[in-house]
Image: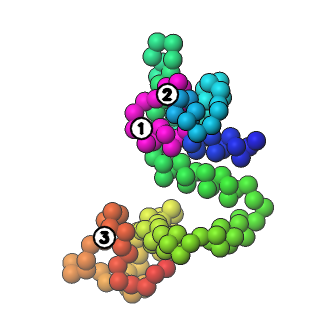
Amino acid sequence: MVRQLGELENAIMTRVWQWNRPVTVREVLLDLRSEREIAYTTVMTVLDKLHRKGWLRRERVGRAYRYEPVSSREAYTAALMNDAWATGDNPAAALVHFFGLMSPEQREALRDALRVAALFPTDPAAPDSPERGAENGAENGAESGPESEPESGPDTGETGSGPAR
């Protein structure tokens, strides 16, 4: 049952993102019924649950609510992955198995994401962070001074010509 509820949540969230506008329970219900038999109260319950989880905001319009997403599909996917990862006793083993399930294209996308994530360290005091790198430029082999190039912006996804970390 838990897996089915998760699939229904995903199906509903997919519609909300695709439609890119506030939606009602009835609209979602009618669209879902093209694929499966489902009750109005089930859709209403799942939309309410997604609202309580913080994934949807809602506004009362007459006697009904209109729901719209709070964040992007990517943020939702990341949260689902984090929740799944947190449920295991051995997160490292879970990651190894997860990586084993990935296609070569997905592994390449993961490498790209890790390169981009390296541009934004979570701990500013970490040895590899740009803030520490500026303090320890000579120690890390980085150039300093006016002739050094500025860091590339976050939208480029490039980490420069140095070795990957």
The stretch in magenta equals 12-28
Give the number of the disc on residue 19. Answer: 1
SS majority, magenta: helix
Image quadrant holding the N terminus, namely top right
Q: Residue at x 35, y 63 (%)?
A: 154
Q: Residue at x 49, y 28 (%)?
A: 27
Give the number of the disc on residue 152. Answer: 3
Sequence-wise, the earlier of marks 1 and 3 is 1
Q: What's the amino acid at mark 2?
A: Glu
Question: Tag 2's secondary structure?
Answer: helix
Res. 17 image quadrant = top left
Q: Count the numbered circles shown.
A: 3
Residue 15 in view of the camera: yes
Say if 31 sits above or below 123 in the image: above
Spot occupied by residue 106 in the image (x, y as percentages of width and height) = 52, 69
Q: CA distance from mark 1 to mark 3?
A: 34 Å
Spot occupied by residue 40 in the image (x, y as percentages of width and height) = 62, 24
Give the number of the disc on residue 138. Answer: none
Mark 3 or mark 2, whichever is nearer to me: 2
Q: Residue at x 30, y 70 (%)?
A: 152
Q: CA distance from mark 3 to mark 2?
A: 44 Å
Residue most toward the front? 34
14 in magenta:
yes
**Mark 2, residue position:** 27
Question: Tag 1's secondary structure?
Answer: helix
As rendered, which of 35 and 17 lies closer to the eye? Answer: 35
22 in magenta:
yes
Q: What's the amino acid at mark 1?
A: Trp
Q: CA distance from mark 2 to mark 1?
A: 11 Å
Q: What's the amino acid at mark 3?
A: Ser
